[in-house]
Amino acid sequence: MFKPIVDLSKARILISNDDGLEAAGIKILERIARTLSKDVWVVAPELEQSATSHSLTTRRPLRLRQVSKRRFSVDGTPTDSVLLAIHKVLREKKPDLVLSGINRGGNLGEDVTYSGTVAAAMEGTLLGVRSIALSQVFSPRHPVKWGTAEQFAPQVIRALVSQPWKPNILVNVNFPDRIAAQVTGIEVVGQGKRKLGDHIEERKDPRGVPYIWIGAQRDENRTLKGTDIEAVHRGAVTVTPLCLDLTSRAAIKTMKALFR
């Protein structure tokens, strides 16, 4: 069981992401974390690693580079970054909390199975550290409303760490595409239905060779109440606990009957 963090100001916080070390969202998250604690470390991918999911680099060596005080880059995935942070950079005293993000774009519904942002929090959880993934929903037609995440993230983080968690749980947080004054509240909800990558573009390069580009369009249900998709589009900050145990307990009984 992850015990409550009674005094967050004394906690060691590790920050990572999938948008890369120089992304706007991670700089905002670092600024937020420094209002919570002075012991803040950043270990993140050198370049953008969106949609890499929970992939681990095993076929080539990794390079860990110190960029500045308590800031490191890894030429690998979000999973690589958190693994190296906990087992190498912070091996003498591991973090009390992993924060991943703030992702430029929501991680809603089935997005969590592709998301490098969620994967960084997943790796933190697997390594025995309480972990939270944070994402800012936005529309390509408008500037990203980072101020919404910056205003609500401290409240959400403080509330979540004040309670005990089971050790196989991580939390996925999404901030709506609204200015902070228009946010309707903070809601704890389940995953919605949202499939990424159904839109495929087939084109030809300048040499006439065909190629395929997987698009970002999603088929999503914004009406199903009690889900992250419905709530975030209604203007709420969504908080969704995710479980690392993917076992379907209901199916076990049925399948056991097949092999008696």
Image (spheres, rainbow, N blue to C red):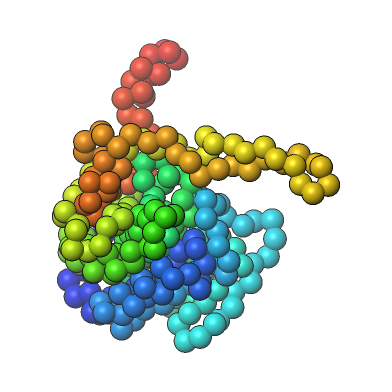
| Residue 28 appears left or right of 48 | left
Check the image and report above or below for 251 versus 28.
Answer: above
Look at the image and tell me in which quarter the N terminus lies. Answer: bottom left
Residue 184 appears in the picture as rendered? yes
210 w.r.t. 148: above or below: above
Q: How many marks?
A: 0
Considering every residue shown, the one lying at the far front of the view is: 141
Where, by quadrant of the figure, is residue 204 drawn? top right
Q: Position of residue 238 (x, y in %)?
A: 25, 51
Query: What's the residue at 39%, 53% (across, down)?
Result: 139
**Can residue 190 be seen at all in this image of the molecule?**
no
**Among the 4 quarters of the image, the one containing residue 156:** bottom left
Quarter occupied by the C terminus: top left
Q: Judge by depth and name the residue closer to the eye, 244 or 180.
A: 180
Q: Residue furthest bottom?
A: 69
Q: Is residue 119 above or below residue 21?
A: above
Which x, y percent locates residue 140?
A: 44, 55
Residue found 36% across the figure and 23% down from its top: 251
Please indicate whether residue 196 sits to the left or right of residue 99 in the image. Answer: right
State the image coordinates of residue 155 (x, y, percent, origin top left): 19, 66
Q: Residue at x 62, y 38 (%)?
A: 201
**Residue plotted at (29% across, 64% down):** 149
In the image, residue 245 lies at what x, y percent?
37, 41
Front residue of 174/88: it is 174
